[in-house]
Amino acid sequence: MKAVFQTDRGKVRLHNEDAGGVFPNQDGNRLAIVADGMGGHRAGDVASDMTLTHLKNQWEASTGVVTAEEVEEWLKHQITKVNQLLLEHATTHSECDGMGTTVVAAITTDRFATIANIGDSRGYLLNESGFKQITEDHSLVNELVRSGQISKEDAEHHPRKNVLLRALGTEKTVEVDIKTIIFEEGDILLLCSDGLSNKVTEKEMMEILLNEDNLEQKAGSLISLANENGGEDNITLAIVEFSDVSEGDV
């Protein structure tokens, strides 16, 4: 298994309110996270950092979470716990009132990958069947697309594109989308904030992931392209590749 994480402030924003990383646990399985914070007075970076810190610490200390059922339950429990922590923090720190964050997280083993998400940070899978988005955006425009009120092309330029219907830390109860997929030799998982997905097409993502560069170079190319196309938002991504163990782990 090989993995890389990169984040960039972009060309417009003064601060980077995204957070993320890739972390092994006691059993050597990996947790990849991308969180895109939101809220005034830089509270967005508080929400994303708190989410990252909690999930990272809990995962690095964990062991025996090996079946798909156990992984799904772990993600659901820990993300629900983060939601409580964010709400409690906001009530005791007035400057953080209204803060929240998206999160997309994937736990990868040598047999499967389990992906959880809230908001519009995305997970994509590249495998022998092609390249596709495997998460569902919890956004207003996605609901309009799903209900047939606008086309997918209309959604790309919709004035309310950034309106989220679900985020972490904004409601007392939170619904987490969780799915488990087969993860096999040669497959690549890409997690990213909308700073990437709003600026780089799926075709461009696939072309970069399929080229001969190493993972660090691929990640850098994706971020550079998002910046070339405007870079109005923070750009964050994690890539996990299922590679032969003889090639070495990164």
Image (spheres, grey):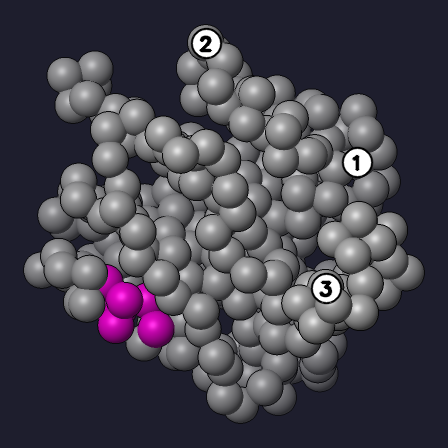
Query: In the orientation shown, which residue stands out farthest toward the front?
Result: 148
Which residue in the structure is indicated by mark 1?
A: 231
Q: Residues within 10 Å of mark 1 (few under 14, many from 20)?
A: many
Q: Earlier in the sequence, mark 3 or mark 1?
A: 3
Q: Position of residue 171 (x, y in %)?
A: 59, 86
**Residue 210 visible in the displayed image:** yes
155 and 244: which one is in front? Answer: 155
Q: Are marks 2 and 3 in contact (CB under 8 Å)?
A: no
Asked if residue 247 lies left or right of residue 17, the reply is: left
68 and 192: which one is in front? Answer: 68
Q: Amino acid at mark 3?
A: Val
Is residue 166 rendered magenta in the image?
no
Q: Position of residue 1 (x, y in %)?
A: 25, 30
The magenta stretch spans which residues?
A: 71-76
Q: Quadrant of the C terminus?
A: top left
Q: Position of residue 179 (x, y in %)?
A: 35, 62
Q: Secondary structure at mark 1?
A: loop
Q: For residue 231, what is the image quadrant? A: top right
